[in-house]
Image (cartoon, coloured by chain):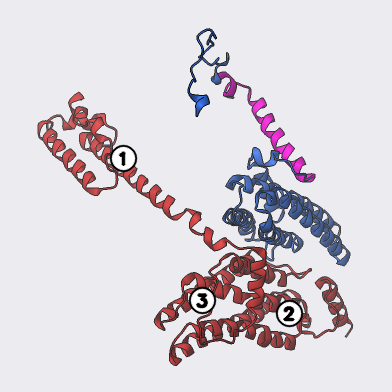
Amino acid sequence: QGGGSAVIDMENMDDTSGSSFEDMGEMHQRMKEEEEEEAEGDAGAAEEEDGEFLGMKGLRGQLGRQVADQMWQVGKRQASRAFSLYANIDILRPYFDVEPIQVRARLMESMIPVKMINFPQKIAGELYGPLMLVFTLVAILLHGMKTSDTIIREGTLMGTAIGTCFGYWLGVSSFIYFLAYLCNAQITMVQMLSLLGYGLFGHCITLFVTYNIHFHSLFYIFWLGVGGLSTLRMVAVLVSRTVGHTQRLILCGTLAALHMLFLLYLHFAYHKVVEGILDTLEGPNMPPFQRVARDIPVGSNAVLNTTAKATALTL
Amino acid sequence: FPGLTDVSISEDIPVEGQITVPVGSHSPDEEFSTLDEPVRDTIMRDLKAVGKKFVHVMYPKKSSALLRDWDLWGPLVLCVSLALMLQGGSADSKDDGGPQFAEVFVIIWFGAVVITLNSKLLGGTISFFQSLCVLGYCVMPLTVAMLVCRLVLLAGSGTISFIIRLIVVLAMFGWSTLASTAFLADSQPPNRKALVVYPIFLFYFVISWMILTFTPQ
């Protein structure tokens, strides 16, 4: 019926403000009133209308459809505005404004504990170095899993490696930031992310060395030495920014414990994953070759593994 | 300014000419519409563009053809073929076919996106899709390495085959990295090239690791 569609004036459907719900509500109200008028007049013809519009209840259906369409457009406009505001990567641009020399200097500094803890130490709020260090840690974890003749589920290991490293970096940073907020420490989230990220440099070095040279005692030396140095640096920086003995103790104790335990976990838990797979594949009569102390210089893992297997067989 | 007091043109010099700009005789519709050409022409044109880019990757010289007309066909084909070839190398082949394909796919595209964002944040002048295009096309040497590795593994899987595979994969990894840096490093400010090259190095390292540790079931 022409009378039905004339009620809905297409020009008035043009959005005026778009972001105020009052306009939407008003438009909706207006359409409802018109619809009610029409409904009273068209009560008789409603049954005929039903037959014409497929599946929708005549006039109400058409109005409903147009209201839905309008709300969709309003929603879409708001979403695209929010998207262009938050997904604009220019927000992150200042955190990536570094030179290679600065990155190298900060890497070196992350291993040197500061002595002056009475004066708040400066932390560079930069995200390039930490992000690259997290990715490097992922790559080192994957490299540590590389054994030539082993059938490894690469996909699962890759997923857990990425998840572990990023989860540690983001999760522990947030947790320590929360504790810092409770303990009144002067540190921002980006600075905390940066500090912890650079603290992973010690982890990278330790794991890189000990995944190639399989001495357990060597690992412990590196754990205490290298891991300890990077932890001491982070702790010293945090102590310089916190006031009060209890607060300092809580904050630094937590951070030191988490950082050192993470390195321990990475070395042993991943070892266990690999050895577990190896043991199930090769049977109990094969000695776990990764625990054999050897003086062979670092070479191809395959050559080492093959010779270890050969010697085990002859023994 | 005494010299500028009289700027009028004297009346005996005629000032004449055409104001209208001559419009091209052909309408723009005829030039740019490719709807009416046979399908074969369209496909061949795209295939030639993709082929030209492959050749550019094989001999990486500093040309802007790879950058100017970017397309993602080549990276898609390479990614799918690499993921297909990497399938079937797991402990139980019963149920591990699916996730491995998806993992390779996700890692390649996610890694490329991260590198692109990183290079943009460091002040690069290259656009998002151009960078994706270059990184995708430079996976080609590694796909060739995967092919070679599979062929070598058909022959046997001892130490010698491992050493051959190691050498091949290392060589192709170096080639990929050099090829992509030849294209991408130019778009960066000169003192920050190392900052952009490093993530590319890591990305191709992870892919090479996946190729090297592949063992068929």
* Residue at x-position 63% and y-position 40%: B71
> Chain coloured blue: which letter?
B
- List the residue tagged with mark 2: A210
Q: Is residue A116 magenta?
A: no
Report the predominant secondary structure element of the magenta stretch.
helix
Can the viewer see residue B28 in this picture?
Answer: yes
> Chain coloured red: which letter?
A
Q: Chain of mark 3?
A: A
Q: Which amino acid lies under the numbered mark 1 shown in the image of this protein?
A: Asp
Q: Is residue B46 magenta?
A: yes
Q: SS at mark 2?
A: helix
Tell me if residue A133 comes above or below residue A83 in the rendering. below
Query: Residue A217 at x, y = what percent?
Result: 73, 89
Q: Nearer the viewer, residue A222 or A183?
A: A183
* Residue at x-position 67% and y-position 33%: B46
Q: Which residues are magenta?
A: B30-59
Tell me if residue B216 comes above or below residue B141 in the rendering. below
- List the residue tagged with mark 1: A69
Disc number placed over residue A172 in the picture, else none: 3
